[in-house]
């Protein structure tokens, strides 16, 4: 997801380009994922505003049944990329300290979305991804995948520390 934006940087404010994405996207961590969607690049007074609406298939492990699956993650990127080299003069552009770390366009005028995609992915990924909403998980006693069928274990797990209270419940009136 790299775009040469030299021509766009030479155009007037408001000029834009739209790119369709349907590719394998390699993140900086080395994991390969599939991204599909659209990227819009808009010339601003400082640089290029990126608006991306993507759906990425992220390799994941289900937090209940431990099966591997591709998690469909919807990511919306809204960021401004600033050039490091003036496209007309070739001089280096120096920016003052800002509270946010901006994204930069490299010296060859290549706008690289991979780091922004990685950051948005980390921020958007659920803590406990599920292969499906009704995932039954694993049996805590024998480890059988309960999505594939029931196991022979007793469903009631008794903690010996509660035995006295259970006797009161069984012996009590109802």
Image (cartoon, rainbow, N blue to C red):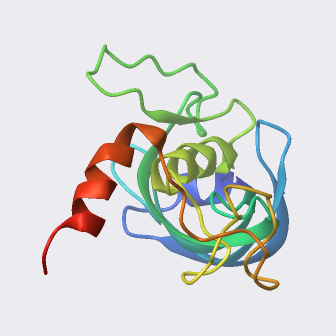
Relative to 91, 66 lies left or right: right
Q: Residue at x 24, y 66 (%)?
A: 171
115 is higher (above) or lower (below) than 69: above
Residue 18: image location, x then y, percent: 60, 78
Question: Which of the pair 80/120 is nearer the observer?
Answer: 120
79 is higher (above) or lower (below) than 115: below
Question: Which of the pair 97/53 is nearer the observer?
Answer: 53
Q: Is residue 48 visible?
A: no
Q: Residue at x 74, y 81 (%)?
A: 147
Q: Residue at x 70, y 64 (%)?
A: 139
Q: Quadrant of the N terminus?
A: bottom right
Relative to 122, 68 lies left or right: right
Q: Is residue 19 visible?
A: yes
Q: Residue at x 62, y 78 (%)?
A: 135
Q: Quadrant of the C terminus?
A: bottom left
Relative to 61, 128 lies left or right: left
Residue 156: image location, x then y, percent: 54, 66
Relative to 138, 98 lies left or right: left
Question: Which of the pair 40/144 is nearer the observer?
Answer: 144
Quadrant location of residue 73? bottom right
174 is higher (above) or lower (below) than 144: below
Residue 134: image location, x then y, percent: 56, 84
Residue 36: image location, x then y, percent: 71, 78
């Amino acid at each position: 997801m790299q775009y040469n934006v030299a021509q766009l940087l030479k155009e007037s404010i408001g000029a834009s380009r739209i790119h369709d994405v349907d590719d394998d996207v390699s993140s900086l961590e080395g994991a390969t994922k599939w991204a599909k969607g659209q990227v819009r690049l808009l010339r601003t007074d400082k640089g290029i505003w990126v608006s991306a609406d993507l759906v990425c298939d992220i390799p994941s492990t289900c937090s209940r049944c431990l099966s591997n699956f591709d998690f469909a993650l919807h990511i919306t990127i809204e960021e401004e990329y600033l050039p490091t080299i003036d496209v007309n003069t070739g001089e280096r552009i120096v920016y003052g300290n800002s509270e946010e770390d901006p994204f930069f366009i490299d010296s060859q005028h290549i706008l690289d979305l991979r780091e922004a995609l990685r950051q948005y992915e980390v921020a958007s990924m659920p803590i406990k991804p599920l292969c499906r909403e009704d995932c039954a998980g694993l049996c805590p006693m024998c480890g059988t995948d309960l999505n594939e069928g029931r196991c022979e274990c007793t469903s009631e797990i008794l903690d010996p520390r509660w035995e006295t209270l259970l006797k009161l419940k069984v012996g009590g009136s109802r």
